[in-house]
Amino acid sequence: MSASSPSPEPVFDGAGEQLPGPRELAGVIRGVGIHAEFQPIIDLARASVVGYEALARFEGPVRSPLPWFEAAKVHGRLDELEAAALRCALDAHAILPTNTFLTVNIGPAAIDAPAVREVWRDFPSLGGVVVELTEHERVESYEALEPVLTRLRAAGALLAIDDAGAGYAGLQHVLTLRPDVIKLDRALVEGLDRDEAKRALVEMVGTLAGRLDAWLLAEGIETGEELDVLVGLGVPLAQGYFLGRPGPAFPAMDTDAATRIISQVKRQDDHGLRLLLEHVPVSRDYDGAVAALADERVDVVVLLDDWQRPVGTLDVDGIVHAVRDSGLKVNVDTPATDAVQRAIVRSSSHRFAPLVCIDDAGRYVGVVRMERLVEHLTRPDSRS
């Protein structure tokens, strides 16, 4: 009687978690224990779902996709796993809701691998499919990608650059591949309402997308404030947990998010300060404001009373400025030209401090930086 073959040694990731083994991996590659979920992609001008991104999901004890793809890489079966995930996604193409598109993810190293080519052959018509080229690996040769991308485009597919602004997704990649969709990485979206440099970068990428006749899609929106800025900047497409979570069917967008978008779009024609708003930390007491300033990204905190009305600001020097005395407070619907004229007559110590904006009931709605206000007024297309 021959001895049985020894079981393979378990493999662990960098965090010490055991990765799925070869047997489990082989089953998933055959289509057992893997399925697709779909996250809605939103038209920010109309607050409607226009597409879905297909995301690989796994059954059993290990549900996160990352350990599975790491295990596939360790065992030399990454192309086969990418093919299995791609097949699950494309299987849903036939039942896609009317007037929506489907985005699928594939790595540049796997896009023309034998297992993936077999999937492409099984789905010869790719109209309404956007192929996202993920950016977690360096593309050694753009020219080598051209034949397969040409074939996919001939079958009706569009091309998206995923995670633009992260990894190796640089200008060279965008300019060489000329994608139909440019997806902003979550790192550029996170805290967008508090970071002027990120706003400028998003505007720059949006200008580039327009020149290339491509759509700009912001991903990873998790707060209403991030959404407000993206709508104000005119970013056409977006996705993220705030807008709608992935689901096994084709989920609708969050109704509160839809209402927020519609309200923001309606206000875009107002001659006020709403599109320039930034949301900084608030506190009802001095100690809470001091604690908020411990974050090096925070340079001002707005102090509120019990009715959400601003009573002052605290800066990084620990100085409290009363909004009534310093002329820091202004109605959010004040025209930008009027707001800057009011600001420049303030005392020299307050002249360049942020304007604290309130609504008609006197409640705090955000701040407007003087730098952003001046930059807005110097634009040729400024309407305020």
Image: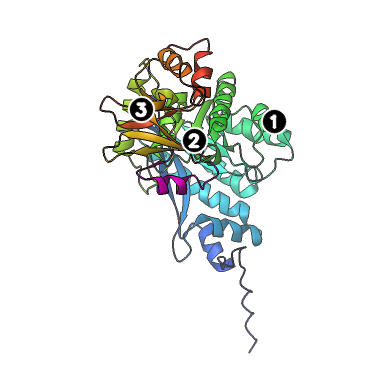
Q: Earlier in the sequence, mark 1 or mark 3?
A: 1
Is 73 drawn above or below residue 178 in the view shown? below
Examine the rendering and report whether any part of residue 158 can be seen.
no
2 or 1: tag closer to the N-terminus: 1
Residue 16 at x, y percent in the picture: 59, 67
Q: Quadrant of residue 102?
A: top left
Q: Is residue 27 above or below residue 140?
A: below
Kindly identify which residue carries mark 2.
194
Q: Is 104 on the left-hand or right-hand side of 44?
A: right
Decide which of tag 2 and tag 3 comes sooner along the chain: 2
Between the C-alphas of marks 2 and 3, the distance is: 24 Å
Give the vertical position of 368 relative to 61 (above or below): above
Alpha carbon of mark 1 to alpha carbon of mark 3: how far? Answer: 51 Å
Disc 1: which residue: 172
Identify which residue, 19 or 89, lies in the foreground. 19
The type of residue carrying mark 2 is Arg
Q: Magenta residues?
A: 279-297
In the rendered image, the vertical position of residue 302 relative to residue 245, given as above or below: above
Label disc, if present, on residue 56 of the rendered structure? none
Circles 2 and 1: CB atoms closer than 8 Å: no
Coloring basis for residues: rainbow
From the image, tell me which residue sits under label 3. Answer: 324
Helix, strand or loop at disc 2? helix
Instruction: Give the crowd class for mark 2: few <14, some 14-19, many >=20 residues within 10 Å.
Output: some
Question: The residue tagged with tag 1: helix, strand or loop?
Answer: helix
Q: Amino acid at mark 1?
A: Gln
User: Is there CB contact under 8 Å for labels 2 and 3?
Assistant: no
Name the front one of labels 2 and 3. 3
Q: As rendered, which of 170 and 296 lies closer to the eye?
A: 296
Q: Nearer the viewer, residue 198 or 165?
A: 198
Residue 187 appears in the picture as rendered: yes
Q: How dense is the environment of label 3, judged by Cα within 10 Å: few (below 14), some, or many (20 and up)?
A: few
